[in-house]
Image (cartoon, rainbow, N blue to C red):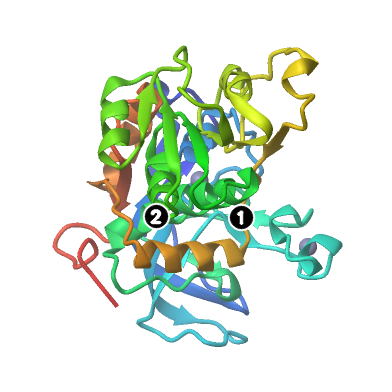
Amino acid sequence: MRALVVERPTPAAEGPLHPVDVPTPRPAPGEILLRVSACAICRTDLQIAEGDVPARRLPIVPGHQVVGLVEAIAPGVEGWHVGDRAGVGWLAGACGQCEFCLAGRENLCPDAVFTGWDRDGGFAERMTARADFALRLPDTFLDVDAAPLLCGGVIGYRALKVAGIRPGGRLGLYGFGASASLAIQVAVHWDCEVYVCTRSEPERRRALDLGATWAGGYEDVPPVPLQAAVTFAPAGEVVVTALRVLERGGTVAINAIHLDRVPEFSYDLLWPERSLRSVANFTRQDAREFLELAAEIPIRTAAEPLPLSDGGDALERLKKGRVEGAFVLLPAGEGSDGAASRP
Ligand SMILES: [Zn+2]
Ligand SMILES: [Zn+2]
């Protein structure tokens, strides 16, 4: 089968993704084999390919927003059948026994493994996944529209929860890429006032189209103090910018696996019980809640479908910031029903 692998992390411009032909993987006990129909590209894939997020295994097939059809089932799998549609996200497995797993915080499990980082992901025609970590997808979404929900969507949703925003509250979103453009739809659904700061003028327009109350640049100050904010930009400077416009007692949730640095700032910014929190991974419960909500709203995704062979170009364009919504690779290829299939 065809796959894109990272053998050695290098800058996106030097092409860290190599097309290779490899044997189709065999599902181990408890796993399913998926024929990948759509895999959305996340910034974390770029960061793994470039080495900003250090590799945990090389070579590795990236891709952790995967939609596919179950093609084979190994012994020990319950609840899945050949032909079912399944989603695979970033969390590929957790131990199920540690204090975090037992407390419903499997996202913090020290033994958690991740798709496209510890295990081969969806930049390939086929992949295997632990059946108990595969996700059911609402019928209402096409494969190409469901894929971007699986990391950007779910983690953006967790970030809203971590930021503690209440229905009707005043929320700030800093940076407005694929994940933020999904999170805003949840916040608007909850009747929040949403204030968006981003450098890009087209992104500001898109934020207003999606229901933002106000949109400005990073240097602009929202007209009201914010009760909660989520930062999506991988820049620590932005975290401090968000902290400055936060109401007393508010929280900034940092939705980034990698930040360049956190600049020094005055303790006065934090003192009136403001909080700074990171958002790490997600739990299966987050995914179930978000996917149900996404179907109910219903969330609109802006996917740009591409053949698998364009994965390297897409990574480079993501690096340069030339992306409207989410890039979605279609490994099942042209002429198949991959882009359009519903269960
Ligand atoms: Zn991701
Ligand atoms: Zn655990």
Residue type, mark 2 in image: His
Q: Which residue is mark 2?
A: 189
Q: Residue at x 63, y 30 (%)?
A: 247
Crowd class of label 1 (few under 14; some 14 to 19; many from 20; radius 10 Å): many
Residue 86 in view here: yes
In this view, the mark in front (1 or 2): 2
Residue 41 in view here: no
The mark tally for this picture is 2
Q: Residue at x 69, y 56 (%)?
A: 107
User: What secondary structure is found at the residue carrying circle 1?
Assistant: loop
Q: Position of residue 72 (x, y in %)?
A: 44, 80
Taking depth in this image into account, of 161 and 19 the one nearest to the observer is 161
- The answer for how far apart the CA atoms under marks 1 and 2 are is 21 Å
Q: Which residue is mark 1?
A: 282
Q: Position of residue 168 (x, y in %)?
A: 48, 48
Residue extending furthest toward the right: 99
In which quadrant is the N terminus drawn? bottom left
Q: Is residue 318 above or below residue 162?
A: above
Q: Is residue 62 left or right of residue 236?
A: left
Q: Position of residue 92 (x, y in %)?
A: 60, 61
